[in-house]
Image (spheres, helix red, strand yellow):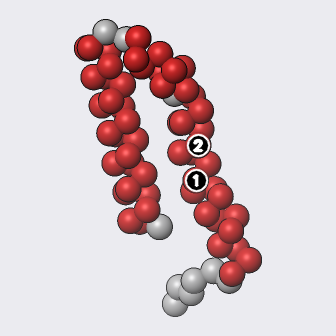
Amino acid sequence: MILPPPGWQRVPLAAILVLPVLVLILLSLPAWITLPFLPADRRKTVLQLVDRIAEWAKSLAKSG
């Protein structure tokens, strides 16, 4: 029988799940800063990346 973790274990677990999203955001910071100055095709690529990250975050939220 699988039981939910006690309250004190939920905080570190949530931090571990959020950490990859924060790393992706920090690593993509140069793209966010240069977004207004990019050509239209490059801007579209960055926005597609954002869509994929959002889908990934939603799938993590559903499974968690």
Give the residue displayed 52% in from the left and 90% down from the top: 1
Whole-percent x and y of residue 35?
42, 19
Give the residue displayed 40% in from the left and 41% down from the top: 53
Give the residue displayed 53% in from the left and 45% down from the top: 21
In the displayed structure, would residue 35 be above or below residue 53? Answer: above
Name the disc covering residue 22, or none. Answer: 2
Whole-percent x and y of residue 7?
69, 81
Q: Most extreme residue toward the right, as rendered?
A: 8
Whole-percent x and y of residue 56?
39, 48
Pointer 2: residues within 10 angstroms few (<14), some, or many (20+)?
few
In the displayed structure, would residue 10 be above or below residue 23? Answer: below
Q: Most extreme residue toward the front, as rendered?
A: 36
Give the residue displayed 58% in from the left and 53% down from the top: 18
- Report whether 31 appears left or right of 17: left
From the viewer's side, name the closer residue of 35 and 8: 35
Circles 2 and 1, Cβ within 8 Å, touching? The answer is: yes
Q: Amino acid at mark 2?
A: Leu
Q: Look at the numbered disc 1 and give the secondary structure of its residue.
A: helix
Pointer 1: residues within 10 angstroms few (<14), some, or many (20+)?
some
Name the disc covering residue 18, or none. Answer: 1
Distance from the alpha carbon under mark 2 to that under mark 1: 6 Å
In the displayed structure, would residue 29 be above or below residue 53? Answer: above
Q: Quadrant of residue 29?
A: top right
Whole-percent x and y of residue 61?
43, 62
From the viewer's side, name the closer residue of 2 and 30: 30
